[in-house]
Image (tube, rainbow, N blue to C red):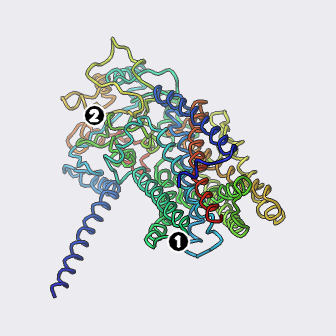
Amino acid sequence: MDKKRRNFLKIAGISTLAGLGATTGLGRLVGGAQSAVAATEEAATAEQGNAVKQNAGDTPCVNRYGMLIDVRKFREDLSLGERVVQACHQEHNVPNIPVKKDEIKWIWMTHYENAFPEQPHLYLDQTNVEFQLPILCNHCDNPPCVRVCPTKATFRDANGVVIMDFHRCIGCRFCMAACPYGSRSFNWSDPRPFLDDATMNKDFPTRTRGVVEKCNFCTERTRVGLQPACVEACGDTKAIVFGNLNDPDSEIRQMLKQHHTVQRNPSLGTFPSVFYIV
Amino acid sequence: MFEKALKGNNYYWMWLAFLGLIIAIGFVSYLRQYFYGLGITGMGRDVSWGLYIAQFTFLVGVAAGGVMLVLPYYIHNFRAFGRITILGEFLAIAALLMCVLFIFVDLGQPLRAFNVMLHPTPSSMLFWDMCVLLGYMFLNILCGWVILTAERKQVAPPKWIYLFVYISIPFAISIHTVTAMLYCGLPGRHFWLSAIIAPRFLASAFAAGPALIVVMALILKRVANFDAGKEAIDKMVTIIIYAAIANMFFLALEFFVGYYSQIPGHMHSLEYLFFGLEHHGHVYNNLVPFMWAFILLFLVGMALLCYPATRKGSDLWLGVGCASIFIAFWLDKGIGFVLAGFLPNPTNEITQYYPHLNELLIAAGVWAIGFFVLTILYKIAIGVEHEIEA
């Protein structure tokens, strides 16, 4: 009798442990997929004005920061693009490397056909052929780069922003292969010789060789209540609007309601947080 | 048993010295890369993986290929493989060592490599790849060593080792499956985003791995007086033929899906590899010669292996046939597959990859380390064989 009970307890204990292990393991694996479903479902509820709580992977994101880029404004003022890129790269000590293959860029101006290659158009309107628009990290709600990183060096913070831990990155560049938007750059050599000591931003770290970097939605600025550098560079033009997509009363949500906007290649299920008025 | 590796004729030492020289050159080149950064490679923002990761991918296949000897011998009791199973297991060890080294030389921050273990991330396929590669390496070292020791003492291997032998079989499949999953789960890389990548990897592995073992066996026959046996070689050639055909069949399916559906993303990389990709009036075709060499070598290899007179008549033609298949699939997977996946880049621009000389020297150095270890392991294995016979 005793022996039977012993065996029963053993089996019960082991199966409970196994069950627990399996659920957590599976939960982690499908975490990304669930959040994608959640995003679509919650889009409807958000419409009614409920606060939306989304979750990709491990980090519960209370906010989901997003950006709305009004491309028309960049056509009206041709120097705006340059100013925006300058502001960002100045703020984050992004080196200006002349060799094209070694380039590092967080935000840059490109043509419509390059930003939206999944929308090929034989007879594209003249404005979109001629003018450029800014592209940057989409801070996806279901980011492939976060999924593939073997060290959690890239992750989502509580604001839904995909950020990098430059000190943990091993430089395997899996995230660069996984990013379907080409938003990530790698330090192919020491970036510091390409920075000007006099104009460098001493408040933001420079990087070392061998790590990946990209736009961080200016977490260092938004944390202290400032707007991202690119948004600030736009002045009062409202060419870039930054805000919390989970807050139905935010300016960005109001504008999204009023305008027809597009995202870069949304068919991949990444749920980009950067929207464009083209 | 290591003492067996310390006795050899002049050719043995000259061969090791030659490999040692290439290793030394590779090591110096690596120091250069280490202190400068990965900028002295052909890789860049658009083609962010290059020769290293391509070699890694191919060598995982070579390692997995050894299972084509282990499986028939231990599961189907195919006795003829008895003498050469150890060659497969030791080849796997050397190939896996090269895999680990190729990953290591590809890291931007190699000293942080252990972060993968410090911060295990189950959602990352690279984490799982590390697990199965190290697991398979451990299994092969364990099984190879225990079985060879038993053989030397002329006793039956201990029963418990068979458990590990049986575990090593699904592990061999898993290393290449998980390696395929590094690629085939990435959104927006159409060439890789194909469910057939894992089977295709396995097919090419089961051809390339045994092909290399046959070449090795033929060399050992000449230089070390080690005869693998006609039946074993013949069976291996059969395996190579079927696996090679399966690989080409899978490749043909990729062509069908791309060109019949006419979806540009599914055609671009194939177009670039085999015909040259036209983009804004410029044709990008730097890999075309390699891919047609792949097709040509496959056909030559198949002809030599399928035609009885060349397969059975002379070791030379048999060796050339197997070497052709091996090189063909190296061109396919060790060059084409990884590089073509990056074209065009996500913003529809095209950058062609050309390896840097320093990168080539490092890659040669890693290959030399692999062959150095392989030579020593084979020397030990054959030393034991000769000891038993004597």
| Residue A164 image-quadrant placement | top left
Q: Quadrant of the C terminus of chain B?
A: bottom right
**Which residue occupies 36% across, 27% down?**
A207
**Which residue occupies 42% across, 18% down?**
A194
Per the image, label 1 sits on a secondary structure element best described as: loop
Badge 1: residue crowd in 10 Å (few <14, some 14–19, many ≥20): few
Badge 2: residue crowd in 10 Å (few <14, some 14–19, many ≥20): many
**Percent x, y of residue B322:** 72, 56
Residue closest to the far left: A2
Taking depth in this image into account, of A262 and B291 the one nearest to the observer is B291
Rendered position, A237 above or below B243:
above
Q: Is residue B130 left or right of residue B231?
A: left
The residue under label 1 is which amino acid type?
Val
The residue under label 2 is which amino acid type?
Phe
**Which residue occupies 34% across, 28% down?**
A239
Q: Are marks 2 and 1 on the same chain?
A: no
Residue closest to the far top: A198
Chain designation of label 2: A
